[in-house]
Image (cartoon, rainbow, N blue to C red):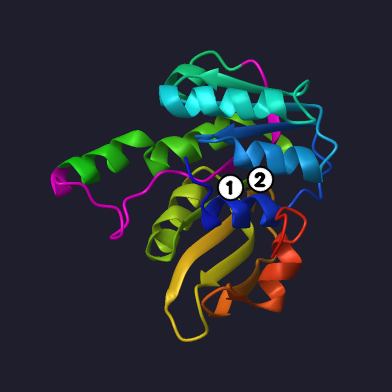
Amino acid sequence: MKIGTDGVLLGAWCPIDNNPFSVLDIGAGTGILSLMLAQRSNAEQIDAIEIDEDAFEQCVENFEASPWGDKLFCFHAGLDEFIDEPEDEYDIIISNPPFYTEDYKTESEQRDLARFADALPFEDLVEAANLLLSENGIFSVIIPFKEEKNFLALANDFELYPFKITRVKGTPTTEIKRSMLAFSRVKKETFVDELIIETARHQYTEDYIALTKDFYLKI
């Protein structure tokens, strides 16, 4: 599985001001978000859940090969199974949820839409965050910008309130493509800004380099 820009962005951006002890990565894929938070924080417990068998196996392999293998653990489970009997609360809940984009296509558009809609509905994700987030916890996601309004409304229904929003553009002239959202259980002023990734192909902006340089071997 390839490492996508979305995962790198979210892993580098996710606020960790609450000095987390425990982290939950929902829909871990390769485990990139868990690994980045292991690098960035002093968290002692980093759990990941992944339903796809191939991705799960790769995630476990990556965890075991990392310097933080003793505190990283991946569950081969769906979110519904995981929250059936919740045992822990988490100081950070982070997710780069699967979503349908126009640049993802197979022969069957109907199958594509169904696969993404069924994989991890936003409603289920927000409900799980509400159930599993600690009192001072932070819930962070990256989603398509066009879904931002809907996602904020969903979170508000569960009394999760945004305190940081960063909208991401590929270049200065393109439309906003993604929204990174961070929520807490406490209402406070929301800090909103914008991040541009490139000025030209592989010409990264100073902001993008500053955010992600600790995670690339070269940039």
Relative side of 3 to 177, left or right: right
Residues 182 and 203: in front is 203
Q: Which residues are magenta?
A: 87-110
Cα–Cα gap, marks 1 and 2: 5 Å
Relative side of 212 to 44, left or right: left
Residue 72 drawn above or below residue 118? above
In percent of the image, x 35 and y 35: which residue is there?
A: 119
Quarter residue 35 falls in: top right
Question: Residue pushed farthest bottom?
Answer: 173
- Tell me the kind of residue under disc 1: Leu
As helix, strand or loop, the secondary structure at mark 2 comes to loop
Image coordinates of residue 56 in percent, x first then y, are 50, 24
As helix, strand or loop, the secondary structure at mark 1 comes to loop
Dot 1 and dot 2 residues touching (CB under 8 Å): yes
Q: Answer whether residue 158 is visible to the viewer in this image.
A: yes
Circle 1 sits on which residue? 160
Residue 109 drawn above or below residue 203? above
Image coordinates of residue 29 in percent, x first then y, are 50, 35
In percent of the image, x 56 and y 50: which residue is there?
A: 7
Circle 2 sits on which residue? 185
Quarter residue 163 falls in: bottom right
Q: Residues within 10 Å of mark 2 (few under 14, many from 20)?
A: many
- Tell me the kind of residue under disc 2: Arg
Image coordinates of residue 44 in percent, x first then y, are 81, 27
In percent of the image, x 55 and y 50: which residue is there?
A: 141
